[in-house]
Amino acid sequence: MWDEADEDVSTLGGKWLILVLYAVVVSIAGLTGFLIGALGIRGLRPVTFLGLITFQPTAVGLAAYGVLTMGLGLGVMLGLVIYVSNNYVDEDT
């Protein structure tokens, strides 16, 4: 069923792939926030993260807000997926 050529192909583990995708998506959110802040769009108001931290509409402020928001949102979902897969997946299948 398997050739010798298939054995030489290295694969990226599923967990590592998800972590890399997580880092890419969070980085894109930070870059997008940075670009929006750097463009100096008029009329932007400060944004608040979870009612705790207020970020000014600057390039760094919006980048930090994007990273924190996306990182927390995706991080919670990723954590739930990891918890369920570690505790509730039947390994016999």
Image: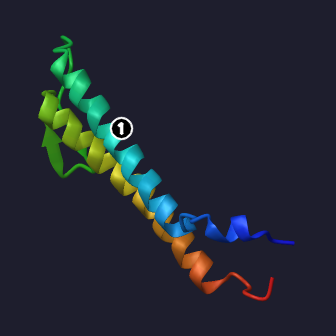
Q: Which residue is at the front of the view, 45 or 65?
A: 65
Furthest toward the right, the residue is 1
Furthest toward the front, the residue is 4
Q: Residue at x 21, y 34 (%)?
A: 62
Label 1 SS = helix
What residue is disc 1 on?
Answer: 28
Q: Badge 1, how many Cα within 10 Å: few under 14, some, many 20+?
A: some
Quadrant the N terminus occupies: bottom right
Quadrant the C terminus occupies: bottom right
Residue type pointed to by label 1: Ile
Q: List x then y, in percent, for residue 27.
A: 32, 43
Please say if 66 is above or below 10. above
Q: Residue at x 73, y 71 (%)?
A: 4
Judge from the rendering whether residue 78 lies leftward or rightward of residue 67; answer left or right: right
Judge from the rendering whether residue 36 lies leftward or rightward of residue 54; answer left or right: right
Q: Which residue is at the front of the view, 24 or 30?
A: 24
Q: List x then y, in percent, for residue 5.
A: 70, 64
